[in-house]
Image (spheres, rainbow, N blue to C red):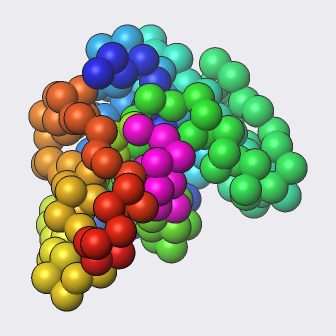
Amino acid sequence: MSLRSICVFCGASTGTNSIYREAAEQLGRELAARGISLVYGGGAVGLMGVVADAAMAAGGEVIGIIPQSLQTSEIGHSGLTRLEVVDGMHARKARMAELSDAFIALPGGLGTLEELFEVWTWGQLGYHAKPLGLLEVNGFYAKLSGFLDHLVTEGFVRPPHRAMLQRSESPAALLELLAAWQPTQPKWQDEQQPS
């Protein structure tokens, strides 16, 4: 799969450990080095600003999508290749998905998880056939991954849909996993399986 642009979901905070900032910088540089455009939430704060700044500093293209209502609180990044201001969160997520060939979640909070799970659900239902990945940093997503495996064990998520979400500690390795990913059969094509 050709990856020309990747949407990165991440926190509007940098977290309590500097390793999260370092991972965001590494991902931004890796995207730029591969000529992959970064699409993200458009903020200048937190890991959002870090990944964008790193990609821009490495000569990459960065497209930010920010709702008008968050333009002030998330401090819309003024140094991007392009910053689009949209009407609200739904428009933001739809536009980010439209512009992206794949999705990666760095560490983040509720917004990061919400964006990841929504786009994952869209893929599960067949609204898109784009890969998703978690950049594992300092064991940040280990417990979530365990819980996701539990959902499979309990019959609420099918193994192929669980496998839609790739995971790696290395930005380079994660990008390779996303490029090699093959689309999964949409959820409703086999009514006999658990949901």
Question: Does residue 50 appear anywhere in the picture?
Answer: no
Image vertical order of residue 16 relative to residue 185, above or below: below
Identity of the residue drawn at 30% across and 39% down: 183
Q: Position of residue 39 (x, y in %)?
A: 54, 33
Identity of the residue drawn at 53% across and 46% down: 127
Residue extending furthest toward the bottom: 154
Q: Please give left or right for residue 110 compared with residue 183 in the image.
A: right
Q: Position of residue 146 (x, y in %)?
A: 15, 77
Depth order, front residue of 159/30: 159
On whether residue 88 falls in the magenta region, the answer is no
Q: Which residues are magenta?
A: 118-129
Image vertical order of residue 17 relative to residue 87, above or below: below
Q: Please give left or right for residue 144 compared with residue 118 in the image.
A: left
Q: Position of residue 176 (x, y in %)?
A: 17, 28
Question: Does residue 184 appear anywhere in the picture?
Answer: yes
Identity of the residue drawn at 38% across and 56% down: 189
Depth order, front residue of 104/69: 104
Res 41 quadrant in image? top right
Q: Tell me how many marks there are.
A: 0
- Quadrant (top left/top right/bottom left/bottom right) for the C terminus: bottom left
